[in-house]
Amino acid sequence: MNAAGASAARGIGFTSQRTRDRMVERLRAKGIGDEVVLAAMASVPRHLFVEEAIASRAYEDTALPIGFEQTISQPFVVARMIELIRAGRKLGRVLEIGTGCGYQAAVLAAIATEVYSIERITGLHEKARANLRPMRIANLRLAHGDGSKGLPDIGSFDAIILAAAAPTLPEALPAQLAVGGRLIAPVGVKDQALCLIERTNRGFVEQWLDPVHFVPLRGGKA
Ligand code: SAH
């Protein structure tokens, strides 16, 4: 990161490290216990992923608009989903579906060895690229396309995380988990819940968890 990038990332007042640390304390108070996830959330400057006009709200625990009728996910939900897929393990290769502005991808890259993130909307794919460029994250690859097919050529992910809700989980995805790998996805239309799938050497184990509210997963490129 260059000097200007570094000072923008450090932030002043409502975008400072102290503000970010307070967000992390609130996440802890709400039940996030994974210190690796909390440290990653403390390190990623969320205010650089939203428009300047709403940067002062970047560390509130809420989803915010990012254009194209999409939102940056609520910090608690980002932390909760990553905590669930990490399950205390070291993460190798991770796939995110729904890059949006790139925030969660940056958090994942602070935790995993290798992160792939797919976005279907061209404008958001480009926005994420621009947001992430000054951060020079070497272990993150962005792809433009329909994430419901996953990335079969890369395959064998330790974790797959969906940032958009499908009425039913796309069939192609669990098959791209490594044995011991975990997938988390919001599933449902009006009533959505987090679905956690673990691939064991005897097959897939499914669990239904918290009610959530996500933008819909859509097919094709846009
Ligand atoms: N990960 C983001 C959240 C983005 S919102 C964050 O850090 O806050 C969810 C995103 O999923 C939207 O940008 C939407 O365009 C995208 N999306 C929806 N369906 C998709 C699909 N089939 N493939 C890839 N991206 C998809």
Image: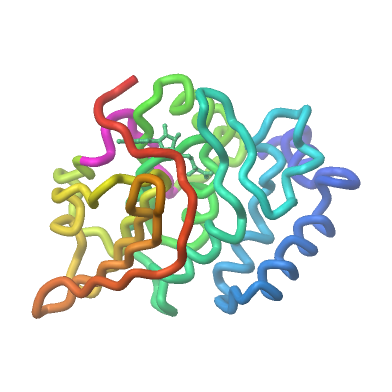
Residue 43 versus residue 49 in the image, above or below: below
Q: Is residue 141 magenta?
A: yes
Quarter of the image that includes the N terminus? top right
- Which range of residues does the magenta coloring cover? 139-148
Residue 210 versus residue 132 in the image, above or below: below
Residue 202: x, y in percent? 9, 79
Question: Residue 4's quadrant in the figure?
Answer: top right
Q: From the viewer's perspective, is 61 left or right of 108?
A: right
Residue in the image at 32% along x and 67% along y: 196
Front position in the image: 168 or 197: 168
Residue 77: x, y in percent? 54, 58
Residue in the image at 28% along x and 39% along y: 147
Residue 208: x, y in percent? 34, 69
Q: What residue occupies the far front of the structure in this picture?
A: 190
Q: Is residue 177 magenta?
A: no
Residue in the image at 46% along x and 61% along y: 211
Where on the image, by quarter, is ligand 1?
A: top left
